[in-house]
Image: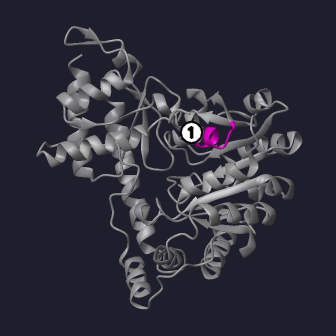
Amino acid sequence: MSLSLSKKAASVKPSSTLAITAKAKALKAEGIDIVGFGAGEPDFNTPDNINEAAIKAIKEGFTKYTPASGTEELKKAVSAKFREFNGLHYEANQIVISNGGKHSLTNIFEVILNPGDEVIIPAPYWLTYPEIVKLSDGVPVFLYGARDNGYKVTAKQIREAVTDKTKALILNTPSNPTGMVYSEEELRAIAEIAVEKDFYVVADEMYEYLIYGEKKHVSIASLGDEIYKRTITCSGVSKSYAMTGWRIGYTGSSAEIAKMMGSVQSHQTSNPNSIAQKAALEALTGDQSALGEMRVEFDKRRKYMFDRISAMPLLELLEPEGAFYVFVDFTNVLEKSYKGQKIGTAARAAEILIEDYQVAVVPCADFGFDNFVRLSYAISLEAIEKGLDRIEKFVSSL
């Protein structure tokens, strides 16, 4: 018997976003002035009231195991948030508190998928979706959104992709990486197909509070009893409350699915961090002013980035409506040559930018769109201005 390793694990792609961020940090540590647009996390500190709640939990000895699927008080707070913000009625026994959004998705797919089940993934997509589906023995099926529809897929596309093996659709709004938001009308059309064809909708709403202008967040599960039964709604405190490192996510689903996810989680990780659960409780029930302040600042950066990049040669983009990313079409750049060689790929463009212009960006091949680059505006306006100056210098030289 040879000491071979798991073929399933070997098939998983490393996270390119984490790799870019790590490379930027390493170069900064060497004293190089790198502007990093790779961050998928707010640059703000966690609000003080949340930190104080965690410190209080430590001092009071709240450092033991909790129930595997989360404390009752946090589940009730999540239930209240779903009711008040999303228009969704989930009881505490329908809530599972996890170790972050990725963990929630892992729980979901381990519970709903059997080998060979298909999961429809609209592209561009968060690069983790297909890897989690594959780890749960599912088969990713990709649909591609068109520019003239904001890179969102249509109900018609979904209908045509459904087979007798379709088990679920992943629906991410606001979107990472595009920042686009599905309207209520679009969601109703998708819900109609999910009910008719009888598949689950995994609604990833992690950026739900970060929507700008006249757009509003609509939870697909709120659009009727039948779609509610088929939807697992995912969110968390990471993005909206600047708590990425605290690792708290949560889901709302049927009681049956929640019970199974809790059972799976009990054997994999046991409970989410007890102290982080107290911090998340304060995030959801305490002073909400910091959330609004962060959203205002993100909106200011969003507008600045869109205006600056729109004016640059060779680059194209749509104005993002939510989250904290811009999704930039580099197709025209890739046709150009740099130092005597055709650039060719977004990965090569990203390599040139970090090595010769000290700017870290995320090429989007792993998001399903080969010619695109994602830039985060979860960095200071000063850093954004400096980084865009460098990108403009690069594209203007071609």
Q: Secondary structure at mark 1?
A: helix
For the image, the number of numbered tags is 1
Residue 135 appears in view: yes
Report the residue marked by disc 1: 131
Q: Amino acid at mark 1?
A: Glu
Quarter occupied by residue 145: top right
Image position of 133 (left or right of 55): right
| Residue at position x 54%, y 69% in the image | 272
Q: Is residue 328 magenta?
A: no
Residue 157 in percent (x, y) is at: 73, 28
Q: State whether residue 50 is above or below residue 61.
A: above
Residue 363 in percent (x, y) is at: 39, 31
Tell which residue pokes out farthest to the left in this image. Answer: 31
Q: Nearer the viewer, residue 250 or 216?
A: 250
Residue 45 in percent (x, y) is at: 33, 67
Quarter occupied by residue 94: bottom right
| Residue at position x 48%, y 32% in the image | 366
| Residue at position x 57%, y 51% in the image | 215
Tell which residue pokes out farthest to the bottom in this image. Answer: 60
| Quadrant where the C terminus is found in the figure | top left
Q: Which residues are magenta?
A: 132-138
Q: State whether residue 142 is above or below residue 108.
A: above
Residue 312 appears in view: no
Image position of 368 (left or right of 294): right
Residue 183 in percent (x, y) is at: 66, 46
Q: Is residue 135 magenta?
A: yes
